[in-house]
Image (cartoon, rainbow, N blue to C red):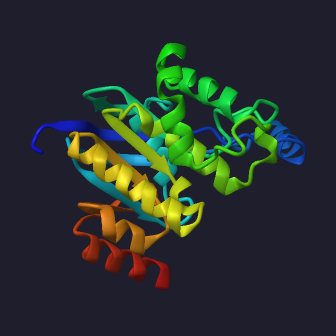
Amino acid sequence: MNSPTIRLIDVGLSFPQHRVGLGSILRWIKRFFGIDARIEPFIALKQINLEIKRGEVIGIIGRNGSGKSTLLRVMSGIYQPDNGKALSSGPVSLLSNVRIGFNGNLSGRENIHLFGSILGHSRQMMDQLMESIIEFAELEDFIDQPLRTYSSGMQARLGLSVASAVKPDILLIDEVLAVGDAGFKERSRNRIKEMVEDASTVVIVSHNLNYLKQICDRIIVMDNATVKFEGSCEDAISVYNDLIKG
């Protein structure tokens, strides 16, 4: 566990802040009277430096709006940083919102093919994995029903089962493990352990601190668009608790 699979070097990212309606009128009035009407961009990430090694399970915690999900999207390549570099050594699978990549009008079986194609897997591969995916998700009795009839927990089970079935080199998980019963959480924990044993890298954003303590090698604390702390689970959770206390 010594070669890096993810490296972020001085990564920065910002988003424009657009206002509509009254905001646009106010900007026109300011420009008319010669007042600076520029709107500063929203800083989503600033000067992020991270190195995540092969076989590690890394947790990311932080208050809402601290940059956790944005950081995952930079790691996955969905967002390109404005400055700095985001590097990965292999294919990346991002499991985010349980509804992203799914179609509510299609059956669970059809959604396995759909989500698999989004992750870059062939139909033939998904056919070979179909039964094991259904079994892991425990959806045998529902797999041919429309996804819109599934609960959020059932969708989460299906999403994680598909995303982890091929054992990607790098799996990024955003809050999905917070959904589901105790049995599903135990199965997902065992699946992640299997991936780590196969030298995969797993990065998890979650508010479930006890769960992260059980499976993570270390935890990153995000605050105000930057890395506040990076280290042991116990120390990271202590830093996080101090932050939320104010």
The front one of 23 and 1 is 1
In x, y percent, where is residue 42? 57, 47
Looking at the image, residue 80 lies above or below residue 73: above
Query: Which residue appears at 62% of the width and 46% of the height?
Result: 97
Query: Seen from this angle, which residue lies furthest left?
Result: 2
The front one of 117 and 143 is 143
Query: Which residue appears at 46% of the width and 61% of the height?
Result: 224
Looking at the image, residue 142 lies above or below residue 80: below
Q: Quadrant of residue 230?
A: bottom left
The front one of 65 and 128 is 128
Describe residue 55's horizontal placement relative to residue 207 as left or right.
left
| Any part of residue 132 in sight | yes
The front one of 202 and 17 is 202
Query: Which residue appears at 45% of the width and 65% of the height?
Result: 62
In x, y percent, where is residue 189? 39, 58
Looking at the image, residue 173 lies above or below residue 118: below
Q: If the image is split into quadrants, where does the N terminus sit?
A: top left
Q: Quadrant of residue 114?
A: top right
